[in-house]
Image (cartoon, helix red, strand yellow):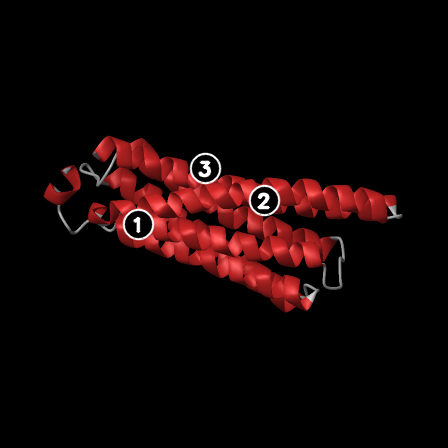
């Protein structure tokens, strides 16, 4: 395969590893917040710090791309992969920010479940992306991609279920608007995770 003949000095793989590690950190932080049922200033600042660190890595990948003639895989795929991973972190940050701005407090069982599924999906994304370093792990990468696709379908079903419940039980129209946005953002994270593995699958096809 092409990757086997490329210089090992390229740090794209290291940068992508860092980026997915920040995505996992963001997902874990959301999970902690959902379990605690509130976002204080400390928790909000921690999420902002993770988001900024993720941005820095995304910028470093693009900067490296502009300086590198030989890349481990298609330049456009590197660019899109960096952007989609950054979008995962950004959307998790958006959820946390909404919880804080909207002053949504109390443990919400639906958000707790969404956070759990998001963590599983982000971990599967990380497994797939880190696997690109060595395509001998093709089966493992493919299985991770399938898992992300499965979890996106789970997210679709969850969104429909929790919105139906919200519309039937929440009497405050403002509360409906607030939670509807949070739930839809949570499902969007899973959509973006699926977008990431679509890029991974495209890379696998091109390197086959």
Task: State the SS at label 3.
Answer: helix
Q: Which is more N-terminal, label 1 or label 2?
A: 1
Task: State the SS at label 2.
Answer: helix
Which sits in the foreground, 151 or 187?
151
Q: Seen in the image, is 52 located left or right of residue 82?
A: right
Coordinates of residue 208 in the picture (x, y in percent): 21, 34
Instruction: Identify residue for label 2.
Output: 155
Which sits in the foreground, 35 or 21?
35
Question: How many other residues sit within 10 Å of disc 3, few (<14), some (14-19) or many (≥20)?
Answer: many
**Disc 2 and disc 3: Cα gap in Å?**
14 Å
Question: How many other residues sit within 10 Å of disc 1, few (<14), some (14-19) or many (≥20)?
Answer: some
Coordinates of residue 184 in the picture (x, y in percent): 65, 42
Which sits in the foreground, 89 or 198?
198
Coordinates of residue 146 in the picture (x, y in percent): 41, 42
Q: Which is more N-terminal, label 3 or label 2?
A: 2
Instruction: Identify residue for label 1.
Output: 140
Q: Quadrant of residue 69?
A: top left
Q: Residue at x 62, y 56 (%)?
A: 113
Residue 193 shows in the view: no
Q: Residue at x 22, y 45 (%)?
A: 135
Instruction: Identify residue for label 3.
Output: 195
34 to 7, vertically: above or below? below
Q: Seen in the image, is 83 located left or right of residue 41?
A: left
Residue 89 shows in the view: yes
Q: Quadrant of residue 204?
A: top left
């Amino acid at each position: 395969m092409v990757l086997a003949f490329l210089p090992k000095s390229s740090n794209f793989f290291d940068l992508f590893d860092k980026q997915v590690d920040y995505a996992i950190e963001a997902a874990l932080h959301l999970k902690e917040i959902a379990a605690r049922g509130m976002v204080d200033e400390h928790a909000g600042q921690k999420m902002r710090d993770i988001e900024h660190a993720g941005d820095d890595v995304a910028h470093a990948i693009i900067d490296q791309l502009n300086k590198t003639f030989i890349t481990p895989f298609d330049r456009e795929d590197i660019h899109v992969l960096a952007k989609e991973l950054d979008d995962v972190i950004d959307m998790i940050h958006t959820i946390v920010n909404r919880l804080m701005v909207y002053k949504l407090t109390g443990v919400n069982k639906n958000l707790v479940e969404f956070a759990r599924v998001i963590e599983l999906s982000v971990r599967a994304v990380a497994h797939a992306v880190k696997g690109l370093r060595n395509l001998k792990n093709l089966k493992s990468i493919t299985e991770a991609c399938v898992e992300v696709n499965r979890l996106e379908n789970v997210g679709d079903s969850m969104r429909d279920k929790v919105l139906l419940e919200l519309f039937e039980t929440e009497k405050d129209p403002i509360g409906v608007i607030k939670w509807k946005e949070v739930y839809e953002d949570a499902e969007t994270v899973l959509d973006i995770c699926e977008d990431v593995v679509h890029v991974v699958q495209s890379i696998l096809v091109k390197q086959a």
